[in-house]
């Protein structure tokens, strides 16, 4: 029994429970770290991996933002690569992040839904996804297919 407990703990942590804890919106309301810390070189979901190709500062593109980074990740699933382009923006408050997400959703003529950690939308038949978590807003667009943007949202720790 003593050896079973550490094995179970390793299995539970390996199955993504750590990401669930990290994604709790109270950790990001407001987010006081650097966005570069969140845009990790590799993110992984259940069967999908994302590798960071690069980031760049885009603060000038977002009104009321404290920090903004554009990013490109490549999704690798079963040997097929798909490019995802996105932006991660940090605002002063969750209220501002939610307001800005609603503006983007309006531009894309889609509706926002409320989630436990913030708000989100899906547009262009799933090719574009946006969400907030605390003071963070993330927008992701897939170059192909409707699943990669949603997969990225599931794998992201924010």
Image: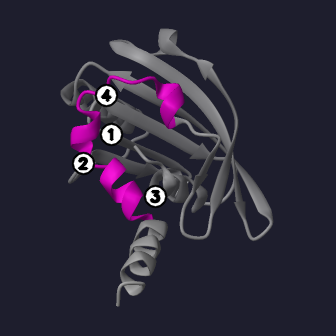
Q: Closer to the observer: label 2 or label 4?
A: 4
Disc 3 packing (10 Å; few <14; some 14–19; many ≥20): some
Figure quadrant of residue 134: top left
Does the CB distance between marks 2 and 4 fall below 8 Å? no
The reply to whether the magenta stretch includes residue 116 is no
Report the side of 155 relative to 6 (left or right).
right
What residue range appears in magenta?
16-38
Q: Is 140 situated left or right of 91 in this image?
A: right
**Decide: marks 4, 1 in contact (CB < 8 A)?**
no
Asked if marks 1 and 2 touch (Cβ < 8 Å), the reply is: yes
Check disc 4 and report the residue beneath it. 31
As helix, strand or loop, the secondary structure at mark 4 comes to loop
Q: Position of residue 133 (x, y in %)?
A: 30, 40
Marked residue nearer the N-terminal end (2 or 4):
4
On residue 117, the disc is 2
Which comes sooner in the sequence, label 4 or label 3? 4
Question: Which quarter of the figure is the C terminus placed in?
Answer: top left
Is-magenta flag for residue 31?
A: yes
Q: How would you classify the magenta stretch by its main secondary structure?
A: helix
Residue bearing mark 1: 132
Label 3: which residue?
154
Residue 111 visible in image: no
Q: Furthest residue to the bottom?
A: 1
Q: How many marks?
A: 4
Q: CA distance from mark 3 to mark 1?
A: 13 Å
Of tags 4 and 3, which is closer to the observer? 4
Q: Answer whether labels 3 and 1 touch (C-beta < 8 Å).
A: no
What's the residue at 42%, 84% (across, down)?
Answer: 3
């Amino acid at each position: 029994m003593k050896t079973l407990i550490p094995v179970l703990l390793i299995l539970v942590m390996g199955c993504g429970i750590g990401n669930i804890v990290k994604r709790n919106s109270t950790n990001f309301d407001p987010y006081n770290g650097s966005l570069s810390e969140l845009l990790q070189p590799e993110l992984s979901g259940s069967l999908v991996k994302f590798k960071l190709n690069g980031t760049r500062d885009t603060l000038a593109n977002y009104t009321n933002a404290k920090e903004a980074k554009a990013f490109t990740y490549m999704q690798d699933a079963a040997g097929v690569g798909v490019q995802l382009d996105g932006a991660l923006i940090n605002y002063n408050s969750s209220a501002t992040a939610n307001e800005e997400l609603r503006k983007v959703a309006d531009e894309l003529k889609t509706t926002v839904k409320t989630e436990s950690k913030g708000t989100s939308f899906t547009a262009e038949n799933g090719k574009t996804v946006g969400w907030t978590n605390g003071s963070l807003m993330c927008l992701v667009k897939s170059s192909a297919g409707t699943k990669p943007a949603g997969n990225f949202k599931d794998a992201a720790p924010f």
